[in-house]
Image: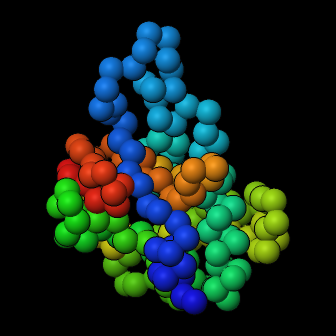
Amino acid sequence: MDFESWIMSTVSISTSTSHSMTAPAPGDEKAKDPLSGMTLLTPEGQEPRSRSSIEITRNALKRIRVAMGKEGISPDQGGLRLGVQGGGCSGLSYNIRFDTQARERDRVFTFGAGVETVNDPSGGKPVRLFVDPKSFLYLAGMVLDFEETLIRQGFNFINPNSTKSCGCGSSFSA
């Protein structure tokens, strides 16, 4: 089974924004900050929380490495491609898949060199994210997280550029 089939069959993609849809309860810091309690990894050569970058969580790093190992994608050449395309309930949809190499105009972000994760098939090798120039307009400043609970598991796009998202969680408006 290829990664796109796997991601759609076992993992839901959801969108979170840094703007709360409902008023947080007084003193509820997590409702105010969707990144509260997360360990963020900044790409090599970038400043933390930069609007000209993308960050991932340690959980996302672990899940990307495990999936790359299952798919036989070499961390030395391949990576995870993040993109945005027209469509979906809210107008734009996230696209996530593996690619064997970066394209000429891609922004390439490298994460996790030397950071080991549980059951890490890569032995702490870095992972790369590839983002095309058009998609980057909508993804700049976002955080990719992976959440695994009893109810759901999936990648979360915590995207400050998203003004609203739909109920299915895989589309948004900017």
| Residue ID at (49%, 11%) | 27
Q: Residue at (79%, 74%) from the top-left corner? A: 121
Q: Position of residue 61 (x, y in %)?
A: 64, 60
Q: Residue at x 52, y 42 (%)?
A: 48
As rendered, which of 1 and 125 lies closer to the eye? 1
Q: Is residue 152 left or right of residue 62?
A: left
Left or right of 57, for residue 143: left
Task: Find the residue positioned furthest to the front.
Answer: 151
Q: How far across and how far down the image is residue 37, in percent? A: 62, 33
Towards the viewer: 135 or 17: 17
Q: Is residue 16 above or below residue 34?
A: below
19 with respect to 9 (left or right): left
Report which quarter residue 138 is drawn in.
bottom left
- Rendered-image quadrant of the N terminus: bottom right
Q: Determine whether 164 is above or below 36 in the image.
A: below
Q: Residue at x 64, y 50 (%)?
A: 150
